[in-house]
Amino acid sequence: MKLGEYNDLTIERFTGVGAFLSDDQDNEVLLPKKYLLPSMSEGDVVCVFLYKDSEDRPVATTEDPKIVLNSFAYLKVKEVNLFGAFLDWGLEKDLMVPFKEQGLKMQEDFTYLVTLRYDNSTDRLFATSKVNKYLLPCEDKSLLGQPCRIMICDKTDLGLKVIVNDLYHGMIFNSDINQPLKRGGHYTGFIHNIREDGKIDVRMVKTGVERFDESEEKVLKILEQNGGFIELGDKSDPDEVRKVMGMSKKMFKQAIGKLYKAKRVLIQDESLSLIPEDNSNEG
């Protein structure tokens, strides 16, 4: 049985306090009477969420929490006391954030980004707002172009920070936001680029099958960061190209040449412009 997750368990027997459920290793847990349905019978397999009640006993529920193990969510603080902050996560017993797990001291009625984790030493679930230590650099290039689960986080000057597949830092650039996206909302996106630092550029619509090499992706990234325009082109000084782009003039020309053929950029003598994705296949 796994705390913080949904488990498929078998109803073994009914009692006055509810039904006892078991797994395939004969471990048992109580599903309280208030969660029972008239259609439930002994031998039925039911999907329940497991956590610990106010007396620190494992308990099952058919209610859906706002967060599950190793995932992320924005949750509101209901109370702060001597033990920590207690969050509303949709279940009867509130979810605790110990003081040592608070990046900033939490306040009642404020909402914070947290992740749900399991402490092996105490056999308890806890939440932490120190989410960065649980997000990894992405090294899996096979994810390029693939759909992904994203959760919307904070807005920046460049776009929206996101968490990708509950594992990675990501970003949706302003130029790729084509619909209202709510902070804390969960959506499907597509992995457009995996940067050298392991962070991911996400787009909300699936793009073409083109695969650009590192120098071409770098040109696109710098264009996106500069509002789709830079003062570098075919006839720019090689030293200026190296200073701005961090690559040779020859490599720069090869990169923008391929991007031009893919209808991603417009090249002029002394400037380079990004062609919006939704217009790149027209005409």
Image: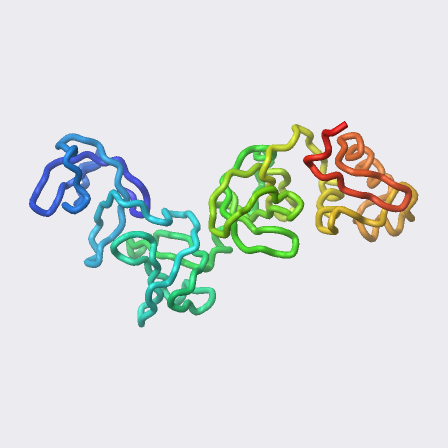
Query: Compared to 191, does 115 lie above or below?
Result: below
Q: Residue at x 42, y 53 (%)?
A: 115
Residue furthest to the bottom:
82
Q: Is residue 143 left or right of residue 273?
A: left
Please name the residue shown 35% across and 52% down the image.
118
| Residue sitting at x 74%, y 51% | 226
Say left or right for 166 vs 235: left
Q: Position of residue 80 (x, y in %)?
A: 34, 69
Total number of numbered discs in the rendering: 0
Q: Position of residue 280 (x, y in %)?
A: 73, 33
Q: Quadrant of the N terminus?
A: top left
Left or right of residue 201: residue 238? right
The image quadrant that residue 126 belongs to is: bottom left
Above or below residue 233? Residue 41 is above
Query: Residue 96 in the image: x percent, y percent?
Result: 33, 60
- Residue 162 in picture, x, y percent from top left: 54, 48
User: Quarter of the image containing the C terminus?
Assistant: top right
Q: Residue at x 37, y 62 (%)?
A: 77
Vertical side of 274 occupied by 43: above or below: above
Q: Nearer the viewer, residue 178 or 93?
A: 178
Indicate the colouring scheme.
rainbow
Q: Is residue 220 left or right of residue 126?
A: right
